[in-house]
Amino acid sequence: MQNPKIKIKNTEILSDNWYILKKVTFSIEKKDGSEETQSREAYDRGNGAVILLYNRIQKTIILTRQFRLPTYINGNTDGMLIEACAGLLDNDHPEECIKRETEEETGYKISEVQKVFEAYMSPGSVTEILHFFIAEYSNEMKIADGGGLEEEGENIEVLELPFEETLHLIDNGGIKDAKTIMLIQYLRLKNIL
């Protein structure tokens, strides 16, 4: 059910070059009952899924490292970011998407995933909701090198790191990606590793 205190007055597409950037003008009813008109921009890139692979016996997790232009232009000097495997849904079910992305990016073929939560990552400007998953992996599940799809311009390094090391990387700024930090902390809070 839509919020009756919000009325969309106009939607203008500012760009649909990569994804869609919209300018939305709307009215909102304030606490005192008065109405105020506002305009905001929202970036619609679709919804996504993210997964953290973990190995209970080895006490390791699988992460990726790749160049991220937005971080580079915002002061990340080499532009490289350590992240959990993730991807856009592209009209797929979140579980199917994340299984496909896991194989493409990490080279691990997983059959069972556990959804742990959903979250909006930047609700002030981006429409995307992320579906968060975890899954256990073993060395036998490694069927390829990973690295992403060349036709999508992906050049992904696969990292297998001790869980304790990733906690130190968060503490010293080596891991700055929010979705990755959330999943590592989830494993920690649930005493999975």
Image (spheres, grey):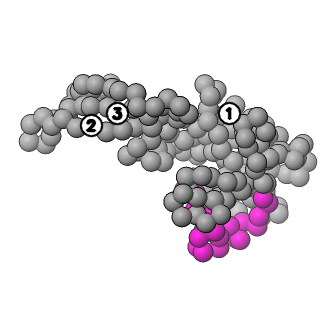
Circles 3, 2 touching at the beta carbon (< 8 Å): yes
The disc label shown at residue 23, or none: 3
Report helix, strand or loop for mark 2.
strand
Q: Is residue 112 visible?
A: no
Q: Nearer the viewer, mark 2 or mark 1?
A: 2
Q: Which residue is mark 1?
A: 97
Q: Which residue is mark 2?
A: 39
Report helix, strand or loop for mark 3.
strand
Give whichever of 126, 153 is nearer the camera. Answer: 153
Horizontal side of residue 46 vs 82, given as left or right: left
Report helix, strand or loop for mark 1.
helix
181 versus 127 height, above or below: below
Q: Amino acid at mark 1?
A: Cys
Horizontal side of residue 114 vs 136, given as left or right: left
Q: Nearer the viewer, mark 3 or mark 1?
A: 3
Quarter of image, res 131: top right
For the record, the magenta segment spans: 159-178
Q: Amino acid at mark 3?
A: Lys
Q: Residue at x 72, y 36 (%)?
A: 152
Q: Earlier in the sequence, mark 3 or mark 1?
A: 3
Q: Residue at x 46, y 44 (%)?
A: 120
Q: Earlier in the sequence, mark 2 or mark 1?
A: 2
Give whichever of 110, 168 is nearer the camera. Answer: 168
Assess whether residue 166 is covered by the magenta stretch. Answer: yes
Counting every numbered tag in the picture gives 3
Q: Residues within 10 Å of mark 2 (few under 14, many from 20)?
A: some
Quarter of image, res 39: top left
User: Distance of mark 2 from mark 1, alpha carbons?
Assistant: 33 Å
Please state the horizontal and vertical placement of residue 104, each as a whole percent of the image: 78, 40
Horizontal side of residue 26 vs 133, given as left or right: left
User: Distance of mark 3 from mark 2, alpha carbons?
Assistant: 7 Å
